[in-house]
């Protein structure tokens, strides 16, 4: 590790001295010839070992090998039945093992396991992070897309293509890759021009960091404000990459595909049903002499949320006249208008027209939505204006209704102050005109004032029908919009990209054309190049068979997850400050072989796990430890602790409670979603919460119960390499966790059911379930004593706390 003086001196070095001609990762890949009778991986590993007078260790025994490869490829241990069949098979171990590898790679559990590794790299989550930490309710289809792509062994070059230009090939969910990172979106930190420009720069910076670090292993984002301090990446290169994505927008987009086509067939029947309900409603209105709903009444629905204040900002009107409203209602989930002056709510506004100064703000919230019974609020001039309503108390609200009179609101947004006791909190946006779907107006507000002359039964009939109209209108709007997904969308003609002085969005220097960093070549595009041509050219560059980084970075990541450390120990930094490869010839050979095998990840896994290097024992040897204590030369299989997700999944698998439901919205680890309030972790889970942990709703900036002790990240930063600490807190967490203790009870129940009442048989079976082997005599003796004194459940707690259970070895 260089000291501070060295780091400072390195920072002063002219980066032009480090070029594509001098740095190892930018050199063309070369393929070393391999002897015909050698496994290529073993050939390179043994070469390095011989230099240190070391040898590969003997093969691991069958039970250890099966457990290792099962956890590696699927994140789950083998069942006792699988272990017995593997051990008892009389054929050569290589043959039996190769068949087992094929079975594991064909399992849907493989995609779930390896998708988590990819999501770590791009720090995918279902909230935006930062102070608001707002929901990305439809981000989960991207996670499902990754799992499906891996299970289907989509070629890696296609995997890249769909994540960058998925909109051109019908893979909309794949575009979640580009907007996976945290983002403080425009308008959340301020609405002045500088704040909006800064937020936009931050949005695009997240995209550049995701693409460059995950696919290229380069920190291009470090050149945002100045030339890169260590790598030959200029500030111009950074903005050239930004120009590639200049048309990108964060948010929800239509999710095309088979599901979308199924929805389309339901639109016409839904329209007919809505027309039928409208006719029934009109007949009732005529029968009872009710006035029709006002067409100037509008409704915005949203998911229920707690609020104490609500603000509507009107940015523009359809006719350019000053904004005006007759009434503003806020409806709670128990169908009460909580914005009534008569109950203590207070209204305020940015301005009032002089002619209307005699009109009190309370007219906005007097409950009289018919303009003939109320007076309007009118702004003093055209342009932006706002109204605000402070509720009497915190309420859970689900929609707002307003009567606009004759002035159409062309651009508006609705925000709330959440139910938070802090003095300073930001407004949280709920609704914007850009997000609004076509929707039939909610009619309940319009009819509320007309029901006083009806009987109770007539009122019930009418309100039931009105509710049916609203629900059917919602259904139709939902179907017409089609399935949605949180993913990148793109403007047809992106705005120009500027080189910024010191990264300051207010100091533009010159327009920049879309391109890649000069050290990697060029794309020969003009600054006005259209979408999606910019991204298409980038994909062509990234998937070029001769690209020096794309496949090197990928095979290194795969190697890392099989052996704990990559051939390059800095998996997302192949630049000058990253590590050099421990086995450079092997890295190049694997990268080129990966391409020749059709960019197939499963073939790469098969090649690695079938090597003697992977299949060797993990037992330490004193002489080898003295030479290579960190096992970088791979004289043995390097044991490592499982990640938090694999530990939780394995606990559920062993207790027979693992829910293997795949896909769809995730289960919750916390008692709420979204908002600024603190999240409280749930301690009890039922069947939905017993799914694999990759299907948990992923919240940034929140620790996940006991599994944070096992270094489970919060997705605020990229995690190309998980921390693998070993601390007493981990044992204490497993021993005292309500979740683990409950699963220990379930495991004890399973053991009794499957092994009977004999304590010795129970211990044998519990050990086989948890550790994939029979217990040694000393282990069995100790557990028999524990069972006799404290019961089988406590023995199961102890087994969950063994190193053997939480380690791959």
Image (cartoon, helix red, strand yellow):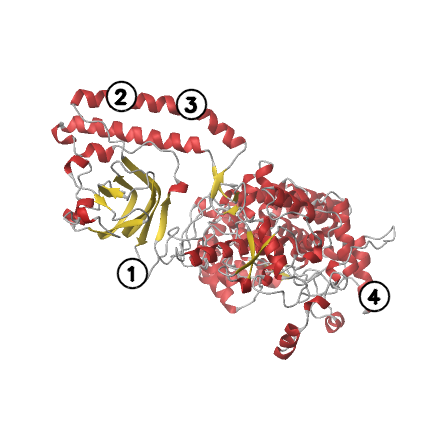
Say few, some or many: other residues with alpha carbon within 10 Å of mark 2 (under 14 / 14 to 19 / 20 or more): some
**Residue bearing the label numbered 3:** 268
Q: Compared to 10, does 757 lie above or below?
A: above
* Foreground pick, 236 / 381: 381
Position of the N terminus, as image quadrant, is bottom right
Tag shown at residue 280: 2
Q: In this view, does 731 lie above or below 146?
A: below
Please provide percent x and percent y for residue 298: 29, 37
Q: Mark 3 and mark 2 in contact (Cβ < 8 Å)?
A: no
Q: How far apart are marks 4 and 2 (CA)?
A: 87 Å
- The answer to which image quadrant residue 737 occupies is bottom left
Residue 162, image x and y in percent?
61, 42
Tell me the element at label 3.
helix
- How far from the left and from the top, in percent, is residue 151? 62, 42
Answer yes or no: is residue 760 visible.
no
Name the residue tied to disc 4: 50
- Which residue in the protein does label 1 denote? 421
Rendered residue at 48%/56% (across/down): 792
Can residue 297 be seen here? Answer: yes
Pointers 3 and 1 in contact (C-beta within 8 Å): no
């Amino acid at each position: 590790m260089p000291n501070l003086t060295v780091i400072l001196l390195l920072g002063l070095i002219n980066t032009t001295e480090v070029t594509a001609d001098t740095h190892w990762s930018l050199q063309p890949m070369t393929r070393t010839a391999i002897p015909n009778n050698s496994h290529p991986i073993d050939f390179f590993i043994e070469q390095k070992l011989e230099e240190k007078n070391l040898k590969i260790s003997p093969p691991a025994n069958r039970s250890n090998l099966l457990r290792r490869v099962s956890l590696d490829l699927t994140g789950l241990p083998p069942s006792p039945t699988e272990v017995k069949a593997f051990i008892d098979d009389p054929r050569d171990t290589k043959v039996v093992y190769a068949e087992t590898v094929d079975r594991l790679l064909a399992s849907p559990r493989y995609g779930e396991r390896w998708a988590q590794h990819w999501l770590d790299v791009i720090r995918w989550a279902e909230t935006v992070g930062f102070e608001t930490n707002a929901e990305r309710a439809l981000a989960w289809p991207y996670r499902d897309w990754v799992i499906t792509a891996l299970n289907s062994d989509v070629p890696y070059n296609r995997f890249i293509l769909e994540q960058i230009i998925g909109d051109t090939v019908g893979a909309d969910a794949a575009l979640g890759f580009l907007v996976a990172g945290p983002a403080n979106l425009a308008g959340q930190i301020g609405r002045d021009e500088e704040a909006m420009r800064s937020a936009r720069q931050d949005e695009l910076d997240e995209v550049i960091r995701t693409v460059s670090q995950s696919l290229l292993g380069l920190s291009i984002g470090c050149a945002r404000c100045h030339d890169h301090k260590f790598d030959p990446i200029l500030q111009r290169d950074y903005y050239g990459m930004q120009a590639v994505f200049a048309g990108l927008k964060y948010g929800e987009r239509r999710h095309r595909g088979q599901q979308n086509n199924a929805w389309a067939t339901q639109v016409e029947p839904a329209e007919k049903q809505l027309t039928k309900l409208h006719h029934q409603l009109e007949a009732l209105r005529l029968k009872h002499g009710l006035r029709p709903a006002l067409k100037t009444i509008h409704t915005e629905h949203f998911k229920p949320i707690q609020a104490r204040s609500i603000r509507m900002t009107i940015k523009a009107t359809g006719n350019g006249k000053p904004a005006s409203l007759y009434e503003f209602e806020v409806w709670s989930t128990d169908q009460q208008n909580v914005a009534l002056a008569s109950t203590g709510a207070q209204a305020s506004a940015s301005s009032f027209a002089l002619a209307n100064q005699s009109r009190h703000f309370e007219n906005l919230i007097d409950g009289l939505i018919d303009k003939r019974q109320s007076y309007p609020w009118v702004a003093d001039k055209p342009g932006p204006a706002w109204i605000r309503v402070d509720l009497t108390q915190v309420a859970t609200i689900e929609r707002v209704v307003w009567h606009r009179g004759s002035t159409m609101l062309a651009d508006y947004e609705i925000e709330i102050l959440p139910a938070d006791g802090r003095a300073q909190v930001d407004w949280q946006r709920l609704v914007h005109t850009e997000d609004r779907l076509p929707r039939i107006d909610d009619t309940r507000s319009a009819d509320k004032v007309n029901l006083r002359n009806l009987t109770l039964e007539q009122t019930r009939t009418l309100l039931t029908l009105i509710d049916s109209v609203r629900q059917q209108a919602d259904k139709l709007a939902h179907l017409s919009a089609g399935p949605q997904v949180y993913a990148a969308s793109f403007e047809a003609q992106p705005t120009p990209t500027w080189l910024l002085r010191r990264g300051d969005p207010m100091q533009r220097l010159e327009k920049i054309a879309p391109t890649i960093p000069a050290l990697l070549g060029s794309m020969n595009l003009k600054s006005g190049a259209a979408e999606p041509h910019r991204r298409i050219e980038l994909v062509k560059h990234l998937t070029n068979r001769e690209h020096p980084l794309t496949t090197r970075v990928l095979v290194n990541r795969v190697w890392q997850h099989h052996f704990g450390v990559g051939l390059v120990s800095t998996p997302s930094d192949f630049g000058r400050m990253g590590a050099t490869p421990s086995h450079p010839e092997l890295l190049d050979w694997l990268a080129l072989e990966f391409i020749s095998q059709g960019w197939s990840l499963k073939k790469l896994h098969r090649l690695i796990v079938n090597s003697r290097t992977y299949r060797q024992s993990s037992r330490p040897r004193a002489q080898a430890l003295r030479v290579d204590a960190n096992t970088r030369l791979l004289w043995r299989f390097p044991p490592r602790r499982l990640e938090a997700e694999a530990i939780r999944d394995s606990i559920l698998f062993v207790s027979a409670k693992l829910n293997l439901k795949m896909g769809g919205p995730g289960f919750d680890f916390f008692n709420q979603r979204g908002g600024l309030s603190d999240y409280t972790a749930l301690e009890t889970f039922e069947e939905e919460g017993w799914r694999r942990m990759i299907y948990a709703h992923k919240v940034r900036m929140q620790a996940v119960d006991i599994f944070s002790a096992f270094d489970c990240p919060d997705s605020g930063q990229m995690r190309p390499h998980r921390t693998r600490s070993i601390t007493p807190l981990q044992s204490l967490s497993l021993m005292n966790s309500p979740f683990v203790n409950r699963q220990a009870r379930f495991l004890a129940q399973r053991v009794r059911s499957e092994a009977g009442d004999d304590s010795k048989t129970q211990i044998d079976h519990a050990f086989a379930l948890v550790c994939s082997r029979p217990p040694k005599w000393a282990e069995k003796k100790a557990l028999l004593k524990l069972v006799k004194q404290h019961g089988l459940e406590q023995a199961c707690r102890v087994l969950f706390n063994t190193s053997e259970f939480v380690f791959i070895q």
